[in-house]
Image (spheres, helix red, strand yellow):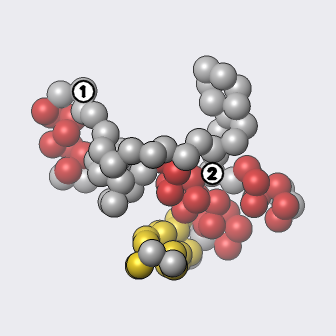
Amino acid sequence: MSANRFDTLVLHAGAAPDPTTGARATPIYQTTSFSFRDTDHAASLFNMERSGHVYSRISNPTVAVFEERVAALEGGAGASARRADKPRCISRSLR
C-alpha cells in the first residue's frame, strides 16, 4: 500500500475486506478474551511462538488494524498502541 495516497492509507491500511460479507470497514471487537483450538494452540500464543490474540488488554483485532494503519502512515515496519489511561492512547511507529 505504499503507493497509495495518505487519505487512502488512513481509511484502508492494515485491513482487508471481510471474506464472508465483503464489508470494508474494520469491525470493533467488543470482547475481552478469545478461544483456542486446543491447549497446544493456547500455549503457543502465550509463549509468543505464534501470532494471535489472547486477551484484549494485550492485543485484539481492532487494535492490530490500528497499529498496522499507523505503521503505514508513518512508513514504519510496525507500530504499538497501548492505552495508558482512559482519555489517552499512546502509539509509536517502529522504523
Residue drawn at point x = 45 percent, y = 46 percent? 30
- List the residue tagged with mark 2: 14
* In the displayed structure image, the side of residue 46 where residue 54 appears, left or right: right
Horizontal relation, residue 55 to residue 61: left or right = left
Q: Position of residue 91 (x, y in %)?
A: 53, 75
Q: Which mark is residue 53?
A: none
Percent across and percent down for residue 31 are 39, 44
Question: Outermost residue, front direction?
Answer: 86
According to the image, label 1 marks what residue?
37
**Image quarter of the C terminus:** bottom right
* Vertical order, 67 against 47 (above or below): below
In the image: residue 92, left or right of residue 17: left
Q: Residues within 10 Å of mark 2 (few under 14, many from 20)?
A: some
Whether residue 60 is visible to the viewer of this picture, yes or no, is yes
Under mark 1, the amino acid is Arg
- Badge 1: how crowded within 10 Å, few (<14), some, or many (20+)? few
Q: Secondary structure at mark 2?
A: loop
Tell me the residue at 62%/51% (across/down). 14
Vertically, is 68 above or below 93?
A: above
